[in-house]
Image (cartoon, helix red, strand yellow):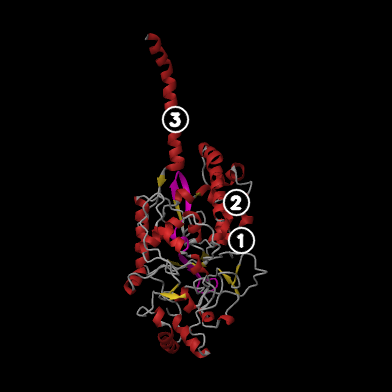
Amino acid sequence: MRQTADRLRRWRPGAIAVVILCAGLGFVAYEKFLARDISIYPDDEQNFKYGSIGNDGATGVPYAIWIVLPKVFPEYLPGPGGYASLGFRWEPGRTQSDAPLGFSRARVGVERMAINCAFCHVTTFRRAPGAQLEFAAAGPGNTVDVLGYQNFLTACARDSRFSGDGLLPAMEQEVHLSWLDRLIYRYAIIPFLKKSLLRQAEQFKWTGQHERPPWGPGRIDPFNPVKFGMLRLADDGTIGNSDMLAVWNLGARDEVRADAPLHWDGLNTSVREVVLSSALGDGMTAQEYDKQTQASLRRVATFLHRTKPPASPYRPDPAAVNRGHLLYVKLCAQCHAVTGARTLTVIPVEEVQTDRRRIDMWTPAARDAYNHYRTGYDWNFSHFQKVEGYVARTLDGLWLLAPYLHNGSVPTLADLLEAPQGRPKAFVRGGEVLDSSRGGFVAPPCDPAHPEKGAFCFDTTLPGNANFGHVYGTDLTAADKADLLAYLLTL
């Protein structure tokens, strides 16, 4: 008995030391990898622009790494200016060390940068060259190159410099790192992030297959990533490239038609489901769908219901506007006025005759898989539907919705009133300067075979990019087109 007691006394300090060491390691592991601290913004608009949607841990890039990637790997960006060359924008008073519009900066172990709803839904514009940059929350993102950002992260991760030796010197110039931080980043966070980004690259490999064209600024294929990734459907070769949508003034939408279809093609009728599924598509996980995330997403829905587009800055000749209004009532109101009989209904693609690639992308199999998606949580989806046309939307903020048609293939309103063969075949996307005479953004013609460096040349001859269809008003006289344009610029 005495020998046993002596043995226990000798082992006790070592056992205590082991327990303390394990507890310490566990605490460090929790603090550096799991501890979650999500900022809550009291203002709904700020929460929309910078709040978390529950994807910080799953897809967020540690801030200390994110901030130095453009400096370490500038050759993988489309042009100079760091992240700004990908269309990222910062509001006045915020520097490039802060989160740009559409990013949350939240802590999951370490501070991380993750996209949110505003990444695709804030319009930036200038009223004239050199004028102050203005922002319209919940409008269609017109500058952000989503696929370009994904490809930039992939290129960085594939580079041998994406390592402790390659990144830590630059990181230490931007943020304070303790000796423990440097060890953790070198041997854990950087290697893990590299593997994660390379795995993500494999998940997006389909974007370069089946003759799929690049998305470009202001465009995204929002559902094929979900089909092939989250829902695990086979690559069917479809193309869903489309313009980012304005999502403002949803409260007025409910007044027009309570069950109005959402998205370009009306594939869902529930705002709650659209917000939730969008968060899932952007990387939200069941583990991060906690009370804070749920509250944040509810506030996003509330903000989208009440926020309205900015008033048009255009002041055309009143007489021309009055004449144009009469033409609008005759030609457009049935599908686009608040009181229109077909407003917020799905117009068959055979009738509107615009590019049908987006319609073909959303399959019955995708509809059924989403309505039955239950991975990790009972999401209660039930409003996804298969449609065969495009939604006739109200024209709230029309002056700021360029380029036009669901795939963004027509740069200005004036071009939309021309017959398809008279519309630009290729033009520069991603502009912010308003075209005060034609309605839209300044979009100069370009040569797809020899694009200017740093500019994205949109080629309407590529699959999914067609600019035909929607020929309403194209047979008007030049004078009537000018009058109708004058009225449309006021919307």
Q: Tally the marks.
A: 3
The reply, left or right, for residue 434 in relation to residue 286 is right
Q: Earlier in the sequence, mark 1 or mark 3?
A: 3
Q: Which mark is residue 22?
A: 3
> Which of the image's four quarters has the N terminus?
top left
Q: CA distance from mark 2 to mark 1?
A: 13 Å
Q: Are marks 2 and 1 in contact (CB under 8 Å)?
A: no
Q: What residue range appears in magenta?
A: 106-133
From the top left corner, tell me how far across and down residue 468 is, in percent.
Answer: 54, 77
Q: Please, what secondary structure does the residue beneath circle 2 have?
A: helix
Q: Residues within 10 Å of mark 2 (few under 14, many from 20)?
A: many
Q: Are marks 2 and 3 in contact (CB under 8 Å)?
A: no
Determine the residue positioned at 43% across, 22% down.
15
Q: Which mark is residue 78?
A: 1
Q: Residues within 10 Å of mark 1 (few under 14, many from 20)?
A: some
Task: Give the residue pinned by disc 2.
Answer: 156
Q: Amino acid at mark 1?
A: Pro
From the top left corner, tell me how far across and down residue 220 is, in percent.
Answer: 51, 64
Q: CA distance from mark 2 to mark 3?
A: 35 Å
Q: Residues within 10 Å of mark 3 (few under 14, many from 20)?
A: few
From the top left corner, tell me how far across and down residue 155 is, in percent.
Answer: 61, 53
User: Is residue 117 shown in magenta?
Assistant: yes
